[in-house]
Amino acid sequence: MNRLLEIIFGLDRGFLDREGDLALRFNPQWPWSDAIGATSWNVVLIGLSVALVVYVYKRETRSQRVRVMLACVRTALLLLVIALLNRPVLSLTQSRTEPSVLAVMLDDSLSMRIKDIRQAGDRFDTRLDAVTAALSKDNAKVLADLAAIHQLRFYRFNGDAVAVQTSTTQPVPEIEPTGQKTQVAESVRTVMRDLQGQRLAGVVVMTDGRDMPQQSIAAAIDDVKDFGVPVFPVPVGSDQPLRNVDVQQVSAQDAVFVKDIANIKAMVRATGPGGQSVVVRLKDKQTGKVVLDAQGRPVEKQVTPEGDEPVEVELQFAPQEEGTLDLIVEADPQAGEIDESDNAREIQVAVLDAKINVLYVEGYPRWDYRYLKNELIRDRTVNISCLLLSADTSFRQEGDKPITRFPETLEELLEYDVVLLGDVDPRELSDSQLQLMNDFVSRRGGGFGMIAGPRFSPPAWKGTAVEAILPVDIARTAPEDWGIDGSTIAEGFRPAVTREGSDSSLFRFFPDRAENERFLKERWQPIFWYARGIVAKPGVGEVLAEHPSEVGPDGRRAPIVVAGRFGAGRTMFTAIDDSWRWRYYTGENIFNTYWVQQLRYLARSRKLGQRKFTLASQRPIYDLGQQVRLVARAIDPQLLTQLPEQLRVQVMSSEGQLVRQETLVRQDGSDTYLASFTAGQVGKFTVVLPSIAPGIEELTLPIDVAIPRLELSTPQVDRVTLARLASETSGQVIELNDVATRLPAIPSAQRLVPLITSQPLWDAPIALAAFILLLTAEWVARKLFGMV
């Protein structure tokens, strides 16, 4: 039936089947209707129509009944025309509900993992856990109450906001607090833009409110205010400064020798309320036990950091076996600490065979030679071969392994780990022997040291193959022949140890750092002569000790001890020749420690080279999001020819789970392989390189990925900013404990919107039919009654 009516009235299919209220309306468009109105037109037209009908049928001579009947037909026809001229339409009025929308923003920055929300007893929850618990309480009743009033839209945010989905089985979205910065107002603005055009009842922001990095939020709040939507911040976390102990950095020598003192240095920083002591321990990663020192005591120290400045902690021990040690430097956790995951850092130390093979070549028997030769012969960790070039051919050369000449082949020279060259005339050696020393250091990782003298070393070595090895520039040096004419130097000096020298073991004579520094400044025996004109090579030489007052040709303090690298090996230049004076009042301890540590420094590359392949990281600790850079190096040239262009490494979690696989790529035919990847999650990881060739053991490398300190520098709740955001937007601050009662009280923004659909009737089939019917009826009737 409805369809038939739709056809008759010219309506769209289904128009009458829709729910709503039908109404007949007119939309006349008369000339000058704005001035005189549509009613006036209709009154005039109806009046004229009636007058016309009266005028026409009053003049007719037929019976009054006939005239009245025909007048009514014509009046109906004219009224129909007038009605059609008023443009009749049939209107269907419906209503649409625009639902209320409530946005819920969850902070997923790193500060939300701080455990400062006290629960029952002494248990602390992380901030994000507390938020999840508040929304999930009583089977998520608060979310059910909100969903009965609003449509919920969830967002996670740190630097900006991102929409997240929920489900009936998981009403609270699961997010991971990994964001490295927090921008509250900027994120709220993003949410409001995203929901623009919807009936937004408000924005609930569950956060600690601390903008990191800090910036002016006035402009952002003004933009948020312009949307006219109230913001309801929910502060999460403590208002008070929080304590956190962080082992920021751990460093050690890349290799130490068996039974030698290994010095592990850690930078420990404490934030929050000060005055609390912290115990820092050295542990074995494999056993989890505290490492013991030479006296069987735990390797640990108690420090009391003050303010935000890091404190350096030294932990010393003597490894007893050769191999690789995986160690952990751990600080005891504190009550209510922000994050305990940064209380420990791992470090790997290579422990090398203590026996060092040394070739000591001297030009003449000066004092340093006499004492140094005897000291090294007595030292059980050194196998020394001495070659005194000025000796008679019948003189029996001294040492653990006596020799009669300088090695003439690289194979002979490779029997040694270190070549120590004294005040030697280079003309005593052939050009091929000089080149051998160059190859020994650069290609085979051998150690080379030169002890300056007044006659030949170093000025006589200009232009030789050895000059390139040295970590110093000797272009401006000249022979002095000091002492030959009976001259003397009356005033001595104590070398000033640089920061790099303090960090090395070369000048570490006492376990206690303060005692060691007092000795170097006050009790160290003075030196009287040093080689002048020396300059450390830029980017190569590292000055470990310098003259306390005199300067060199470059305007800097004159270098006394300079370390460096040349190719695969290590080098050292000593500008003095009377270190034997350090035996005064100290016996053998200071003199022996200085020289043995120097030889061990020089021998490390050679000893490490015996492992044939090394794996290292650009740094032991990375911030989340930084690029991890791995460097592997084939030290053995023969091994290098057997290796492919790419090597696979595995990154394992602390639980032994595979995190990712990466590829080490060989660099342009060199002996170095590189790999880099993004540190994507916080934790302690181990990089594993499986055995790459027979005889090459699996290599492991610990790597830490830490929380960036920016997010945790001032993690207490910023109530001032949150209160301002609420005030400027006509919202309210809601405490976390009041979420269940106050969030459902946010007024609904729902609205009913009327929808009117109109269909014109003036051109409907029934209108045409009625017009024709009335017109025809009047014409037929007039014919029947004989009217013209």
Image (cartoon, rainbow, N blue to C red):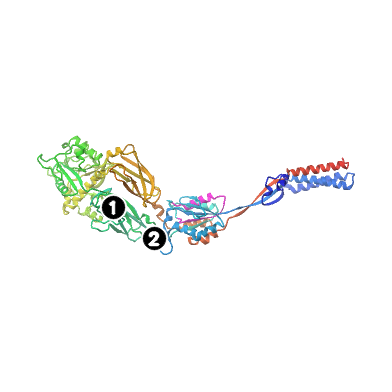
What amino acid is labelled 2 in the image? Gly
Specify the label residue 490 is tagged with. Answer: none
Residue 459 in the image: state x and y as whole percent: 20, 39
Q: Earlier in the sequence, mark 2 or mark 1?
A: 1
398 versus 136 height, above or below: above
Please give left or right for residue 187 compared with residue 573 in the image.
right
Residue 311 in the image: state x and y as whole percent: 32, 55
Please give left or right for residue 138 compared with residue 84 in the image.
left
Please give left or right for residue 261 compared with residue 199 in the image.
left
Residue 121 in the image: state x and y as whole percent: 41, 64
Which quadrant of the figure has residue 606?
A: top left
What amino acid is labelled 1 in the image? Ile
Residue at which label 1 appears:
264
Residues at circles 2 and 1 in contact by the CB criterion of under 8 Å: no
291 versus 385 height, above or below: below
Residue at which label 2 appears:
336
Query: Which residue in the rendered view is the most extreme toward the top?
Result: 431
For numbered disc 2, what is the local secondary structure?
loop
**Dot 2, crowdedness within 10 Å: few (<14), some or many (≥20)?**
some
Residue extent of the magenta highlight: 181-209
Residue 248 in the image: state x and y as whole percent: 34, 53
Q: In this orientation, does residue 462 appear?
A: no
Image quarter of the C terminus: top right
Name the one closer to the observer, 553 or 747.
747
Q: Is residue 189 magenta?
A: yes
For numbered disc 1, what is the local secondary structure?
strand
Q: Is residue 468 magenta?
A: no
Name the one closer to the observer, 451 or 152.
152
Q: Residue at x 45, y 59 (%)?
A: 130
Q: In this orientation, does residue 406 appear?
A: yes
Name the one closer to the observer, 690 or 737.
690
Measure the C-alpha gap from mark 2 to mark 1: 28 Å
